[in-house]
Amino acid sequence: MALAFQELQIASPMINTLALNLIAAVMGWDNETATEEYAWLQLMSSMKYDGYSDFRAGVRFLESLVSWLRHFDAADRPAAYDFVKTRLVYISTLEMQRVIETFVPEIVTPYLRRSVGARLGIKPYEVWKTAEAAQAFSYRLRRCLFVGLSDGSRIDVLRRTNAGRLSQEQVVPMMNVDDEKWRSLAKDLRKVGVHHYVSTMQARDALRGRVLEAEAKLPTKSWGRAIVTEGMLLPDKMKIGAVDKNTRIPTATSTVDKPIVEMCGKYYDHELYKRLERHCKEAGQSDMKYGYADCALPLILEHNTPNNSIPMLWAETDGPQGMHPLFLRRDRHG
């Protein structure tokens, strides 16, 4: 084992050097440019991108970048590389963990303090002033139920972060539980909170609209008031291109993003839409050039790439104009 480890330590820099040289060749860099870009690539690879969980065996960011850049025409490669360097948003494992760690103290606790304070007729900051108020707070926290809505809920991290604060019975890892279980859970639920660790303005607005629609159409619903919160709200300006206010589809009017918006169309394979057609039709889409719901995000999450990021980053198809991913996405809808 010791010998194998030493060999890996020796081989790893050689692999990186080969990948860097290949990138330079693909991009047509001179020595001065290559030296400058190597420093940035090595830093970002080691600090962030190599931590992506869905790289194939033996492949990390630099190797994936070489393959991805080769897929584009030589004239388009500078725009693709510049997009990765200046517009890509990558949320690492450590960054996501910090967002999850703040959920209970910064979202749940203030909400419960206000609730307990209102019931006892005291200020929220006075909740822990008396034994009665502190006990009321603990009781309300114990009645909270936390339900994971997707793989991104990171229930393992939530449980570990809040050990001693939340019990195992308060956490349901997924929504797909049987009717009997839901009925038993609903007996104690009066208010429902939907919390996103990371959310966009578009996603938040859409969710709030659906909550209002559900409240209007489901008079016999088992919950009371629903609130929507997020740990990190991503601004609309993060989207690729200028978004049409009516269609919400990116256009090539943005000088900065014009090349990448055009590439989203040029290197799009409609086989992707056919594979995800049922899911896409739910969002009223006729193609997947800009990702689910035409969100056009340049976003990568360490555990998987969201399907509302531009497919040019994550899609892989075998069609006539096959798409090649930089960060391969695990697809649940295909």
Image (cartoon, helix red, strand yellow):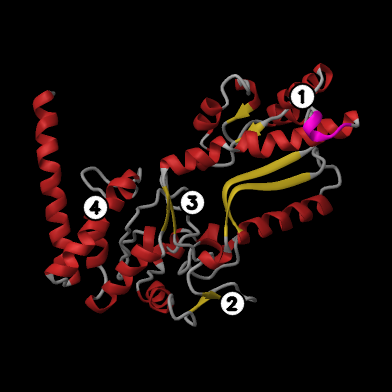
Is disc 1 surrounded by few (<14), some (14 to 19) or many (20+) residues within 10 Å? some
The amino acid sitting under disc 3 is His
The reply to whether the C-beta atoms of the residues labelled 3 and 4 are less than 8 Å apart is: no
Residue behind mark 2: 244
**Is any atom of residue 175 visible in this view?**
no
From the image, state whether disc 2 or disc 3 is nearer to you: 2
Residue 53 at x, y percent in the picture = 35, 43
Disc 1 and disc 3: Cα gap in Å? 47 Å
Compared to 297, does 77 lie above or below? below
Q: Residue furthest top?
A: 131
313 and 241: which one is in front?
Answer: 241
Name the side, left or right, on which 325 lies relative to 152: left
From the image, state whether disc 3 or disc 4 is nearer to you: 4
From the image, state whether disc 1 or disc 3 is nearer to you: 1
Question: What secondary structure is found at the residue carrying circle 4?
Answer: helix
Residue 9 at x, y percent in the picture = 14, 36
Give the mark count. Answer: 4
Q: Which residues are magenta?
A: 122-126
Residue behind mark 4: 42
Q: Residue at x 61, y 75 (%)?
A: 247
The amino acid sitting under disc 2 is Asp
From the image, state whether disc 2 or disc 1 is nearer to you: 1
Disc 2 and disc 3: Cα gap in Å? 27 Å
Q: Which mark is residue 128?
A: 1
Taking the magenta stretch, the answer to whether it contains residue 125 is yes
Question: What secondary structure is found at the residue carrying circle 3?
Answer: loop
Residue behind mark 3: 333
